[in-house]
Amino acid sequence: MILVTGATGNLGNATIDSLLEKGYSSTNIVALVRDAEKATELKNKRITIRIGDYNNYESLVTAFAGVEKLLLISGTDVVNRATQHGQVVKAAKEAGVKHIFYTSFERNNDTETSPIAFLGKSHIETEKLIKASGLKYTIFRNNLYLDALPMFFGEQVLTTGIFLPAGDTKSAFALRKDMADAIANVLTGKGHENKEYSLSNSENTSIQEIAQDLTEIIGKEINYVSPPQDVYVDALTKAGVPTEYIGMFAGFAEAIKQGEFAAETKDLENLLGRKPTTAKQYLAKVYAS
Ligand code: NAP
């Protein structure tokens, strides 16, 4: 039996769909959800629903009963996430789970000097906890989602162009559904014990190249401006963007610029058994019409 946490979220839900698309039986899939009202769609797919919250240890132990493989989709509470994940790992052990799979993040700088250390620290702590737990493990180093790019570009990107302090550095952004397909292959495959995989694209691309792709896709020049950080922060502040979002956008842009998401790996391609979706293919789907 495979339990998927974060099943009401994008990646968890997509992974369950990937398992079903592979022909894996819904009767062997358990979805952990913290709000039963959000689980209607999963119930319609005949997935077993168990209620649990990363903040509630007992709920986790109960929910994990009889589970052999547990996919821990990282949580969204960045401040408390390491503690929450610690509870999941402990509960997994207590419930007799055999193998834990964790969606971490791709990076090149593990230190406090990373512009996204505020997000990365809890992932790195979780990886250590998992490795020290004695459980069999598989860690996925998820690159930045291609699906997240439109959020960074803003709704008016086709009119205004791209304004992001991300420099010319290339990144291996990957599609969330490709990651889900790869994770489903690992969950149902063999030989993945105590392994780490980078879920990164086979092709690295810069934001400048993405602007060029967009230009070709829509048939109109899309400019890319990479301003200094302070100019960017000032522009977003004046536009009324909430402070926490500005910090997040600026941090990720700086991380792109510093090469945090650059990756020379074929792990994703190998796990998929096909080429991952390229940035241009994804952009064409989103922006062509
Ligand atoms: P998402 O759609 O926000 O899904 C997050 C899931 O975690 C939701 O199902 C949420 O439940 C669940 N969750 C959060 N706190 C929980 C708790 N205390 N107990 C139980 N479940 C909890 O995110 P996603 O797009 O699927 O991405 C998966 C994860 O990757 C995110 O949570 C985040 O850690 C990370 N992430 C990665 C990228 C990237 O570019 N690689 C981008 C964004 C996020 P509810 O539905 O009840 O809220």
Image (cartoon, rainbow, N blue to C red):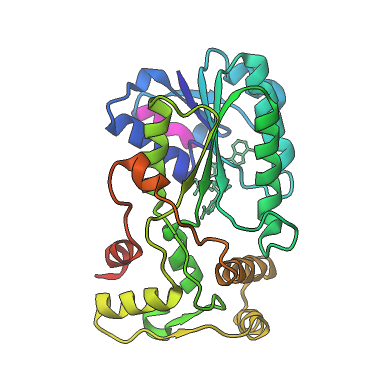
Q: Position of residue 83 (x, y in %)?
A: 74, 37
Say if residue 202 shows up in the picture: yes
Q: Residue sitting at 67 percent across and 39 percent down?
A: 126
Compared across the picture, whether 178 is left or right of 2 comes to: left
The quadrant of the picture occupied by the N terminus is top left
In the rendered image, residue 43 lying in the magenta stretch gets the answer yes
The quadrant of the picture occupied by the C terminus is bottom left
Q: Quadrant of residue 241?
A: bottom right
Q: Residue sitting at 25 percent across and 70 percent down?
A: 288
Q: Position of residue 192 (x, y in %)?
A: 46, 29
Give the residues in magenta: 38-44
Q: Position of residue 117 (x, y in %)?
A: 70, 57
In the rendered image, residue 275 lying in the magenta stretch gets the answer no
- The answer to whether 76 is drawn above or below residue 43 in the figure is below
Compared across the picture, whether 273 is left or right of 130 comes to: left
Q: Quadrant of residue 172?
A: bottom left
Q: Residue sitting at 34 percent across and 36 percent down?
A: 18
Q: Position of residue 242 (x, y in %)?
A: 65, 70
Q: Main secondary structure of the magenta part?
A: helix
- The answer to whether 66 is drawn above or below residue 12 in the figure is above
- The answer to whether 159 is drawn above or below residue 48 in the figure is below
Q: How many marks?
A: 0
Q: Residue sitting at 32 percent across and 76 percent down?
A: 214
Q: Quadrant of ligand 1?
A: top right
Say if residue 55 shows up in the picture: no
Compared across the picture, whether 215 is left or right of 164 comes to: left
Q: Quadrant of residue 61?
A: top right
Q: Nearer the viewer, residue 226 or 60?
A: 226
- The answer to whether 73 is drawn above or below residue 228 in the figure is above
Q: Nearer the viewer, residue 116 or 261?
A: 261
